[in-house]
Image (cartoon, rainbow, N blue to C red):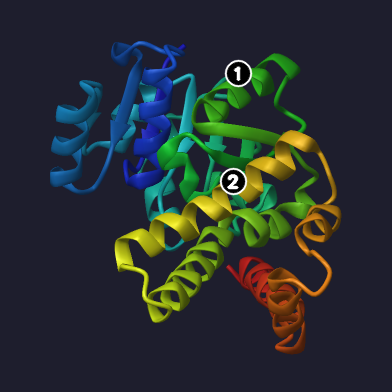
Amino acid sequence: MNIGFIGMGNMAGAMIGGLLKNGLEKKENIYGSDASEAVVKKRTEEFGINTTTDNREVAKASNYLVLAVKPQYAVSAINSFKDVITDDTVIISIMAGKSLAWLDEAFGKKLKFVRCMPNTAALVGAAITGVTPNDAVTEDELKNAISIIESFGKASVVPENLMDAVCAVSGSSPAYVFMFIEAMADAAVEEGMPRAQAYEFAANAVYGSAKLMIDTGKHPGELKDMVCSPAGTTIAAVRVLEEAGFRGTVIDAVEAAAERSREL
């Protein structure tokens, strides 16, 4: 199948890299367009795929077309190629806040749409992506779309009313985690640890903790309790986090991201 990308920024680059690295598609079957000639040149040199600044060329060549433009540029991008889209084309949108109904309106007719929300961990093949198809997408087409998405991580089908939550809890959350890592590293530096080493310890602690939860399937509260020895260092730190409203602040932040997603 031919896979096209409208927009070839970081997320599209991660997807293209994943497709090629995992052998899911040959480079001659991948097409990409971008308004920036510099980006077009970069992706050509990086991947050897078919590239252009003309969205129409990519749209006409693709069986599966990934909309990878920023939401604020969506209308102008869609208007540049929507007249050449056929009813058989499966359109995969990774645009935050743009619903299936919005896509219907933007294209002027009901087509095959798969709405998804990945996160920046796609750059290292570790994304988690929420996926919502419309009722025009067949079971086989959805499987193909998911295989494209899983080239850079995991995918989970969710009802569309949860997509704002997906955006908040995974799409935006790398930023929260990076802030947490940075804060822990700053504290380690204050305790005398060299900066580079502090980042290494903090980042690997977060990575290892997430892997432990995923691999064991244990509840995070249970794993937290396993670390908290009576009268130990960890419970002392947990007390400070609780007094500072750590959980409530995180909940408020995730809800703010979800609300912003609804506004887009």
The one of 208 and 76 positioned closer to us in this rendering: 208
Counting from the top left corner in percent of width and height, residue 170 is at 62, 54
Q: Which residue is at 67% across, 59% downward?
A: 169
Q: Is residue 42 visible?
A: yes
The one of 107 and 209 positioned closer to us in this rendering: 209
129 relative to 195, above or below: above
| Quadrant holding the C terminus | bottom right
Q: Which residue is at 57% across, 54% downward?
A: 206
Q: Which residue is at 52% across, 38% downward?
A: 126
Q: Which residue is mark 1?
A: 144
Q: Which residue is at 31% across, 61% downward?
A: 196
Q: Secondary structure at mark 2?
A: helix
The one of 15 and 76 positioned closer to us in this rendering: 15
- Which amino acid, by three-letter code, is at mark 1? Asn
Q: Earlier in the sequence, mark 2 or mark 1?
A: 1
In the rendered structure, the answer to whether residue 155 lies left or right of residue 54 reads: right
Locate residue 34: give its quadrant: top left
Q: Which mark is residue 208?
A: 2
208 relative to 197, above or below: above
Counting from the top left corner in percent of width and height, residue 28 is at 29, 12
In the rendered structure, the answer to whether residue 16 lies left or right of residue 48 reads: right
Question: Is there a contact, CB below 8 Å, between mark 2 and mark 1?
Answer: no
- Which amino acid, by three-letter code, is at mark 2? Gly
Counting from the top left corner in percent of width and height, residue 221 is at 84, 59
Q: Is residue 111 visible?
A: no
Q: Which mark is residue 113?
A: none
